[in-house]
Image (spheres, rainbow, N blue to C red):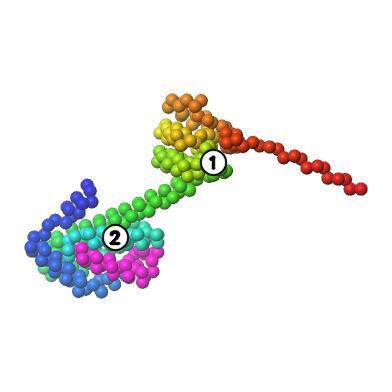
Amino acid sequence: MTLSELEERSQPNLDSAGAALMRELVTHLAQHRTALREEWVDRITDAHLLGAMTREEIFAEATSVYDTYVEALETRTLEALEAYAQNLSERIIPRGVETHEVVGIVLLLRDVLARSLFAKYHGDTSILNRVFDVYEPAANSIAITVAVGFVRERERVIREQQEAIRELSTPVLQVRERLLILPMIGLLDPHRARQLMEQLLRAIRANRAKVVVLDITGVAVMDASVANHMILTVDSARLLGARVIVTGLSPEIAQTLVNIGVDLSKMNTVGDLQGGIEEAERLLGYKVVPTAEPPPAAMAL
């Protein structure tokens, strides 16, 4: 069931009597705004929620949340609430506020308002039942909207952090002109392998590289999907005018490449990173010339 479907079920259309009763509830909640808001903040503090925020900050947010909450009850629309929930999430997630805390404070507000309505209408059971028939579906819908909005924003932040970590874990290093090294460490999944290919090809073009050393010494295992990405990387680099030297190929990964039909004779592979750099320098025309030994120091008389 989608969020919109859940909201539709939890917000049945009100008849004229129900709409009039909702207006009466909203008027009551607006008139008692100060006392109810203070009670809500006290309960948030007692429940040890929003611990990353000061009481003054909690009180300021509680004022905005309360007003937005009552507005959603009055208008029976969630657009303003969704926008505020998004803004709130962007501000408090970096502070370390957890999902259960946001859900907790919204449920506490629902409870505080429900208790106030009970105190007002408990003398007439029939009216009290009608009050909660109107209030509870709307309050539940508001709680769902805020919770889902927070979770979505938190997931977005997590995805951005994961992307940043992946970028840091796959650095393309320029060791000399036209020579790049890409050391791979850790687990390679298809997403990271695809990111690797894109990052490497961008670096080849930006640095006008002619040779790339792809070191996979730190990669323990590689499945067929990831191996195919590596082959595509080698072929794509060749189309950009760069040769790829693969170093640190383990027997297990070599077996995976053979099993998927890769002709290893068409890949330039070298046993270790040092050998790969030496081969790259040879391809680029560099020569290692030993320096002359210094003459022996004259013996003191």
Q: Nearer the viewer, residue 223 or 49?
A: 223
Q: Where in the figure is residue 114, as x and y percent of width and height?
A: 21, 65
Q: Is residue 6 magenta?
A: no
Q: Main secondary structure of the magenta part?
A: helix
Q: Secondary structure at mark 2?
A: helix
- When the figure is inspected, residue 2 is found, relative to residue 217, above or below; the finding is below
Q: Nearer the viewer, residue 97 or 245?
A: 245
The label number, if any, that marks residue 209 in the structure image:
none
Write down the residue under mark 2. 85
Classify residue 191 as left or right of residue 204.
left
Q: Nearer the viewer, mark 2 or mark 1?
A: 1
Q: Where in the figure is residue 172, as x and y percent of width and height?
A: 50, 44
Chain-order first, disc 2 or disc 1: 2
The number of numbered discs placed on residues in the rendered structure image is: 2
The span shown in magenta is 44-73
Q: Which quadrant would residue 34 be assigned to in this image?
A: bottom left
Q: Name which residue lies at 32% across and 67% down.
A: 61
Q: Name which residue lies at 17% across and 71% down.
A: 28
**Is residue 150 in view?**
yes
- When the figure is inspected, residue 78 is found, relative to residue 286, above or below; the finding is below
The label number, if any, that marks residue 178 in the structure image:
1
Q: Name which residue lies at 50% across and 44% down.
A: 207
Q: Secondary structure at mark 1?
A: loop
Q: Are marks 2 and 1 in contact (CB under 8 Å)?
A: no
Q: Name which residue lies at 82% across and 42% down.
A: 296
**Is residue 275 in view?**
no
CA gap, disc 2 to disc 1?
50 Å
Disc 1 marks a residue whose amino acid type is Arg
Report crowding for label 2: few under 14, some 14 to 19, many 20 or more residues within 10 A (C-alpha): many
Q: Where in the figure is residue 231, as x and y percent of width and height?
A: 45, 32
Disc 2 marks a residue whose amino acid type is Ala
